[in-house]
Amino acid sequence: MTSTTVPALELLTTPQGIANPYPLYDRLRDLSPVPGYRDWPPGTVPGADEPVTAWALFRYDQVFQAARDSATFSSRDPLQEASSAPSLMLVNTDPPAHEVERKLVSQAFSPRRVKRLEGWLGELVPRLLDALGAGEVEVMEFAAEIPTRAMVRLLGLPDGDHVRFRRWANAFMLSSSLTPEERIASNEEMVGVFAERLAEHTALLAERAPGDDVEDAEDLISALLRAEVDGQRLTPQEIVRFCVTLVVAGSETTTFLIGNLLHALAREPELTARMRADRTLLNAFVEETMRLDGPPQRLFRIATRDVEVGGKLILEGEWVALFFGAANRDPEVFENPGVLDIDRPNIRQQLSLGHGLHFCLGAALARLEVLAVLNAVLDRYQSIALADDPGTKQTASLLTHAYVRLPLLLS
């Protein structure tokens, strides 16, 4: 890989670039792919692990093709596998293992099981808004409560476990500034707790009488223990890895998405009034906000063969960074890409949930959670506005684009 001195590429990893990468993406898109991007994959430990040096893809067509071609762009992450952090399930798995894992997980993590949370969310969110109150309020703590509590309920864990979920996710996903020792300790605590919970569920499952029909009532961990496809079952280690994946990939990204959606409601009063009158528009609003300000910004892949992209040769074994956040604002695909437009005809082409083999398994759960929030907020507050305080963006890692503190005026 030829080194690069493109200033915009170097600025991407600064706090200012992480907080607002979109102008930099615009400068880099025509140069894509750009060599020499240095950063850490999720789950590694800056200060203990070395950053990778990668080709960076910023154009929609390039990111889309790389995301769908898992044979050429592998999701396996040898750096994370060698790290002290746990390796994620599905996210860092290639075929044929990926298909087997996904079938087993999907059997337990079913649409019906997710749908069962709908009524519970309908009661939880208004209760949390009661506690939030009105006036100038900071909404990110509220935003974090929904996905973490939902994950605890889904997995069948004790009340209170959700308090640690956000801290674990922030540490793993590099969106909080920690020492290497603090990050390693957080990862070890997370894996240890899930191993304990799995042992408890295994013991309870063994006590059930054969033939008991428990599917409608059982939690996700128990369902994962029972899942079987063609005689294959998930190992205890795989179940722990999936629980870790749900926490770090599900709770944090949904928290950040809720924050970005609430900010969009506040800065787009005419659109908010339109959606208040017609809630069928909320799905398009979620899709368009994910395109414009989707939390996931980039993921890494590794080339399994020499491949030409944009007239440049990426060699076998070289790292490749797929910038979904840049692809989602490519003017060749999305007209006026910096404008939130819920009527754009290709609104579902956004890539924040991934594409192809690695399309987000938790997409239905995330949508259920954010729609519960949006409906409850629109029901409760007649006015949703920006405060004078602009809040604070996440500046620790370009993995996500998000607020860590967001004051809004609610009345």
Image (cartoon, grey):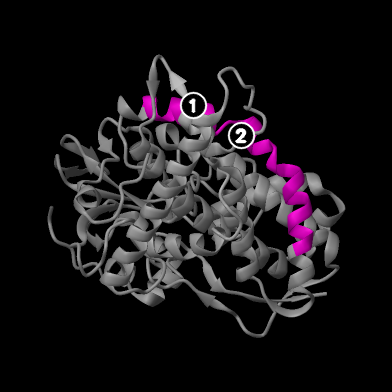
Q: Which residue is mark 1?
A: 226
- First in residue order: circle 2 vs circle 1: 2
**Relative vertical location of residue 122 with respect to residue 263 in this rendering, above or below:** above
Location of the C terminus (image quadrant): bottom right
Q: Is residue 347 at all visible to an observer of this figure?
A: no
Q: Is residue 116 magenta?
A: yes
Q: Which residue is mark 2?
A: 218
Out of 369 and 301, give the one closest to the viewer: 369
**Numbered range of the magenta stretch:** 99-127
Q: Where's residue 324, x and y in %?
A: 43, 50
The amino acid at mark 2 is: Glu
Q: Residues within 10 Å of mark 2 (few under 14, many from 20)?
A: some
Out of 139 and 305, give the one closest to the viewer: 139
Residue at image location 58% in from the left, 51% down from the top: 152
| Residue 39 lies in quadrant | bottom left
Q: Secondary structure at mark 1?
A: helix
Q: Where's residue 6, x and y in %?
A: 24, 67
Q: Where's residue 309, x and y in %?
A: 26, 41
**Residues at discs 2 and 1 in contact (Cβ within 8 Å):** yes
Q: Is residue 100 magenta?
A: yes
The amino acid at mark 1 is: Arg
What number is the disc on residue 124? none
Residue 350 relative to residue 139: left or right: left
Residue at image location 69% in from the left, 43% down from the top: 117
> How many numbered tags mark residues here?
2
Q: Residues within 10 Å of mark 1 (few under 14, many from 20)?
A: some
